[in-house]
Image (tube, helix red, strand yellow):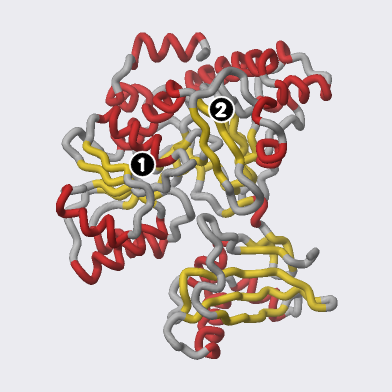
Amino acid sequence: MLGTLRKAFERTIIGDSVPALVRWGKHVPRSVIRGIQEDGFRDLIRYAAARQKFFARKLREKGIDPSHVRRPEDLGDIFTTPEDLRNLPAEDFLCRKPHLVFETTGTSGGPKRVYFTYDELEFTARYEAAAMYENGVRPGDRVVCTFDAGYWISSWVTFCACKRLEVFCSAIGKPHPREAYSRMGLYRYNVIAADPTWLVSLSEIAEKEGTFPVKLILAAGDRMTDVYREYVESIWKCPVILGYGSTEQGGGAGMECQRRDGIHLDEYNFWFEILEPDAEGYGELVVTTLSRRTMPLIRYRVHDVTRWIEDPCPCGATIRRVARIKGRRDEMVVMGAGNMYPEIFERVLHDVAGISENWQVAARQEGLHDILEFRLELSNGISTGTVEQKVRENLKARFPDVWANQDCGMYRLAFRFLPPGSLSQGRKPKRLVDERNS
């Protein structure tokens, strides 16, 4: 049930061709894109008001007539949250019979379950295929996809996207990097799709034992720091392109182009908002799924913090870009050091020798003082004093404002050193925690 303008655009101009989708979709005027979004949004609101218990209930509580809703702001403070998905029955969100379900756990709480039909999965894959095509994937390429499978959606969408592009694809779940490395030459993979930290482990093996010809690496999942990206690119001698999305968004919702200056968002299938931007423009990303009808999400609070990039991209694409995700709203900690995000500590710790990749920073309280505690695992017998000195030096050099607040007594630094494995937290570790209320 796509909007009239959208259906006409796809039927008469694009058809079923991924190259045509890239060629035409990339240069659609902003006014047409906004028209497609507004048309799709109005259709979705009426559809969900008639079929989704959760949204209909929200409209009744606020006294809003769905026929008067034209844009997201017309809904006032109506949102869908991760807590809603986690705590309410699926029947509150389902609008028709589903064919499949995926789960996502995020950084806290139990799983959120999101339902789809087969055609929705294939439709989502078509747009991921377009993003892959734009970045150079062509028939004849051989893709190895190591996104976690199980109840996660990413692996399935990438597999279906490769099917669309008619490229060889091994979607193998998330094996040990050694297992994948042993098959790189055998199957002649020249495109890798994987989580950033898994890519680092694979690259460490390749650095010691040799690489294979690879033309492109697609990374998505946990955050990829500049240091990670530079390291992986230096080993494989090819670009690393970052994708963005989530299970709630149906897998991919955006991807970088070869310029690698911000994420191009899929505005044909989503309406994105940024709530309560700060002085630098950073705010919480909110997403409405315009094209889904099994379990549409209206103004879903993703909790990811980013900002719009207003300058046109040199690649020529007219769809908007956002900056790389700064952090998550539910991971931000406001304390004497300032507004803290995990990204800050990734940059502080990335080149500290002798610690493992498992780490955590906690904000806690001692008496009247905020304490910023680094919890680190020592990995090679280095002295704790050496590690502590390097962390302090990095914090002072890379975040002088945060260091100045420490000098002023607004918080104190502390360190806790732990044996390897102590901080292992599963698929999505919570890097920054606030323990002041516990």
Q: What mark, if any, has residue 170 been given in the picture? A: none
Mark 2 highlights which residue?
289
Mark 1 highlights which residue?
257
Give the x, y percent position of residue 336.
74, 69
**Disc 1 residue crowd, few under 14, some 14–19, many 20+, Cα 10 Å:** many
Residue 279 vertical placement versus 57 (above, below): below
Of residue 336 and residue 179, the one placed in the foreground of this image is 179
Q: Residue at 67% across / 25% down in the picture?
A: 91
**Disc 2 residue crowd, few under 14, some 14–19, many 20+, Cα 10 Å:** many
Give the amino acid type for the residue marked by disc 1 in the picture. Cys
Give the x, y percent position of residue 280.
62, 51
Q: Residue at 60% across / 14% down in the picture?
A: 43
| Residue 181 visible in the snapshot | yes
Q: Residue at 51% across / 14% down in the picture?
A: 2
Q: Is residue 87 left or right of residue 375?
A: right
Give the x, y percent position of residue 419.
53, 80
Give the x, y percent position of residue 172.
32, 46
Q: Residue at 54% across / 88% down in the picture?
A: 384
Q: Is residue 294 left or right of residue 52?
A: left
Q: Based on the displayed image, in which of its 4 quarters is residue 298 positioned?
A: top right
Of residue 220 and residue 423, the one placed in the foreground of this image is 423
Give the amino acid type for the residue marked by disc 2 in the picture. Thr
Q: Nearer the viewer, mark 1 or mark 2?
A: 2
